[in-house]
Amino acid sequence: MTSPPQIEAVIDLEAFAANIAALAACAPTSALMTVLKANAYGHGMIPMARAARAAGSPWLGVATVDEALELRAAGDTGALLCWLASPGASFGAAVEAGVELTASSAEQLREIADASRGASDRPRVQLKVDTGLSRNGARGPQWTELVAAAAAEQAAGHVEITGTWSHFACADEPNHPANDAQQDVFRDAVDELSAAGVHPGLRHLANSAATLTRPSSHLDLVRVGIAAYGIRPDPTLTYETVLTPVMTLRARIAQVKRVPAGAGVSYGHQWTAGRATTLALVPTGYGDGIAIAASNRAELQVRGERVPLVGRVCMDQLVVDLGDGTATRGDVATLFGPGHDGEPTAQDWATASGTIAYEVVTRVGGRTVRTYKGLA
Ligand SMILES: *Cc1c(COP(=O)(O)O)cnc(C)c1O
């Protein structure tokens, strides 16, 4: 028997499936896309793709063409959209693999059409309008140019326009005026496209936060990322939907030792024992995605008790102060989990290290072994 991993992310596929079902119920008249970019926010792209399909997600979404091709190579055959490409991306291969591409400018639409000239199918392309995030997508006169290019390329039989979409800037602040403003811009952009004789196809705008709180934005499809992984898009966002965090990050204690009062702990002695105490060494660090900013701030759970992370997080290790508590080598130290048994959550780590929970789970990697439980 192999020994359990030193550092392990346990991924609860039942919770993932339940989250997807709950999110689908939030937007009952829209199709659902589960977003799997960046290794499924650290959860492992291929197993999460399989689980999302099994949970009834009709669409999957990723950022890059390479991520989409990796899903196809792993056997995924369902509806799949990607949306972020630098010039020279493998558009031809994506079209052959039945991946839907996004065009954010007329130039990109023509590049997609040119790259897939020899392909057996016409490229299926969705058009991205920048409604106010000022990131990807065509805005103002660029949109007018993209609309004209879409009309021309579709009439010439070079592409098939299958969708029109955009992305919110402030959906985790439901009362932010940018939300309504972006919906208005989106409506106008769709009207402009229709007026040019191009059917907009699937219209979509909502991310997790908008799926949970803004039914007027659900349109034909909702794109859910963080909420599918059971994490609140923002800790202050309120909604009725029950979501369960999918990832539990835990490690097995490598050493336990008693130190005297005054002992400095870890590089720079950023923490010093105020009295004699027991320390436990947890074999994970920034090499696995644990933020140095969590040094002296985060807590872990050992034997049912919350214990503070003391001193600086190192590349491979971190230290917790057990006080007069005890632990043995090999005991489990839980960094975060759903929080149902008193363990910290990814949001707690985000708060402790001055970031967002998205970053906490997405950074998990390095030597971390992902173990999948529940369902196949
Ligand atoms: C990441 C992403 C999403 C998902 O966002 P969440 O806030 O995680 O739900 C949706 N759409 C696009 C374009 C994205 O890049």
Image (tube, rainbow, N blue to C red):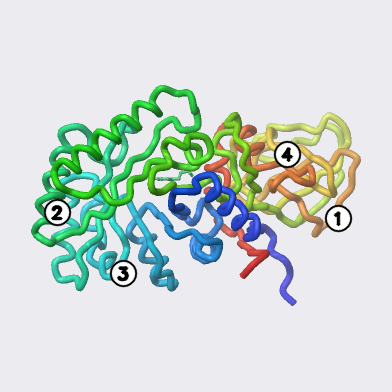
Whichever of callouts 1 and 3 sits on the residue coming sooner in the sequence is 3
Judging by the rendered image, the residue that carries numbered circle 2 is 110
Q: Tell me, yes or no, whether the two marked residues, 4 and 1, touch with CB atoms within 8 Å.
A: no
Image point 14% across, 61% down: which residue? 158
Q: Tell me, yes or no, whether the two marked residues, 3 and 4, touch with CB atoms within 8 Å.
A: no
Give the structural element (helix, strand or loop) at label 3. loop
Tell me residue 303's x, y (percent): 85, 49
Q: The disc labelled 3 sits on which kind of residue? A: Ala
Name the mark on residue 299: 4
Image point 67% across, 64% down: which residue? 373
Judging by the rendered image, the residue that carries numbered circle 3 is 97
| Ligand 1 quarter of the rendering | top left
Cα separation between marks 4 and 1: 18 Å
The image quarter in which residue 323 lies: top right
Q: Tell me, yes or no, whether the two marked residues, 1 and 3, touch with CB atoms within 8 Å.
A: no
Cα separation between marks 1 and 3: 51 Å
Dot 1: within a 10 Å radius of its alpha carbon, few (fewer than 14), some, or many (20 or more) residues?
some
